[in-house]
Structures are given as structure tokens and as C-alpha cells.
Image: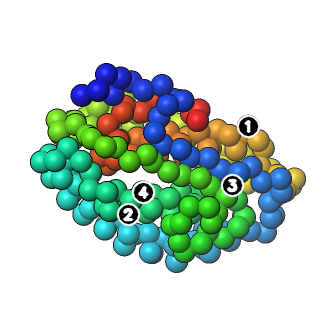
Amino acid sequence: MAEGALAAPAQSYPLTFDVEYPEELSRWLIFVKGILVIPHLIVLYGLGLVASALTFIAFFGILFTKRYPRELFDFVVNINRWIANVTTYIFLMRDEYPPFSWDAGEYPVSYDVEYPEELSRWLIFVKWILAIPHIIVLAFLFTGAFLALFGAWFAILFTKRYPESLFNYMVGVLRWQLRVNAYTNLLRDEYPPFSLEA
């Protein structure tokens, strides 16, 4: 295993996620976004099942070759990008309706994961255990995120703006979650940082 694979600093983590801050948001969309996103949720449920199957296949690819098959990797990253787009819409962070697409650059959300040339054979057996501290912290962070979302809903209703501090907190929590997902879903070996920062 490469040195530093268990503790990469936040700045060097090979996953990027960011959301463009909106200057103004619609007051009325906050009432219907949960309904409008239902078609995406149906499609993403099916794609999530496919991603789980691909991760299972990748497990054996990594076990025998120390590589995540590139086509499977790209497919899973693309599904995660689509999920990131839809999540930012549900969390009221953008008003533009997410495209039914996983292509980068089609939505004001950036998500990407660097392809690893080699992965550890032994880490695939223990990543879910090593991620438990993150899961515990994320439970608290998401409690804060839902409180922030509640506050942002009223702020948008009265001011048409997402308070920037709450917005940055939400982006940080989602970034942390996406890093942990990339780790536990075998996309990267580097242990995710305990950080909200990019």
C-alpha cells in the first residue's frame, strides 16, 4: 500500500465536488422541488442497483488484478455525478432542473473522481469497517444539514437567497459524504479526510 493511503490531506483527495453559489433562488420552487424530482429518483434507484452490481464485479477485478475496470469505474462515477446533481436540487442549492444526464458540465455542480491506476487487494475487505468513524460523524453532520436546510427554506422564502454560510456547510457535508462513498464503494484507497473543505 502506498504511504499516506490511510491519511490523505483534504487538499489532495482525488475527488472533487463543488456547487456554484446562486445569487437568487425562486420562492415558489421550494414548495415543489420534492415532487418535481420524482422522475429522477425513479431512474436513479435503478441506476443505483446497477452501480451496486458493478461494485460487486469490481471487487473481484481489484482482488485479482489490483485494478478497478475502467469502464465500470467511469459508469459508477457518472451515476454518482447524476446523484450529486439531483441532491443539490433537492437541498434547494440550485433552481435549474437537473438534466437526465451524467455528463460533466451540464449542471452548475462539479463532481469527479480520479481513476486509480492500482488499488489495494486487502483494503477491499475492510473499508466498510474503517469508514465507521466517518459514518458516525456524518450522522451528526447530516442532522446539522437538515437544520440548515430548514433555515435555508425560510431564508429563500423571505429573501430569495440561500445564506452563504449554510450553503457552504451543505456543500462541505455533501463533499464529505461523497468522499466516504467513493472510499467504501472501492473507487479510491485513500482514507477520506475528516474535513468539509475542498
How far apart are labels 2 and 1 at the CA level? 33 Å
Residue annotated with mark 3: 93
In the picture, the disc for residue 103 is none
The type of residue carrying mark 2 is: Phe
Give the labeled residue for mark 4.
77
Residue in view at x 51 percent, y 66 percent:
102
**Residue topped by disc 2:** 75
Q: Residues within 10 Å of mark 4 (few under 14, many from 20)?
A: many
**Residue 172 rendering spot, x and y as whole percentages:** 59, 39
Label 1, label 3: how far apart the Cα atoms are = 12 Å
Disc 4 + disc 2, Cβ < 8 Å: yes
As drawn, 141 above or below 107? above
Q: CA distance from mark 4 to mark 2?
A: 6 Å
Q: Is residue 113 above or below residue 33?
A: above
Q: Is residue 103 left or right of residue 150?
A: left
Residue 39 falls left or right of residue 73: right
Q: Which mark is residue 165?
A: 1
2 and 1 marks in contact (CB < 8 Å) = no
Mark sitting earlier along the chain (3/4): 4
- Which quadrant holds residue 55? bottom left
Amino acid on which the number 1 mark rests in the picture: Ser
Q: Nearer the viewer, residue 91 or 130?
A: 130
Residue at the farthest right position: 159
Amino acid carrying mark 3 in the image: Met
Q: Is residue 91 visible?
A: no
- Secondary structure beneath dot 2 equals helix
Q: Nearer the viewer, mark 2 or mark 1?
A: 2
Give the Cα separation between the discs numbered 1 and 4: 28 Å
- Disc with the residue nearer the chain's start (3 vs 2): 2
Q: Quadrant of residue 78?
A: bottom left
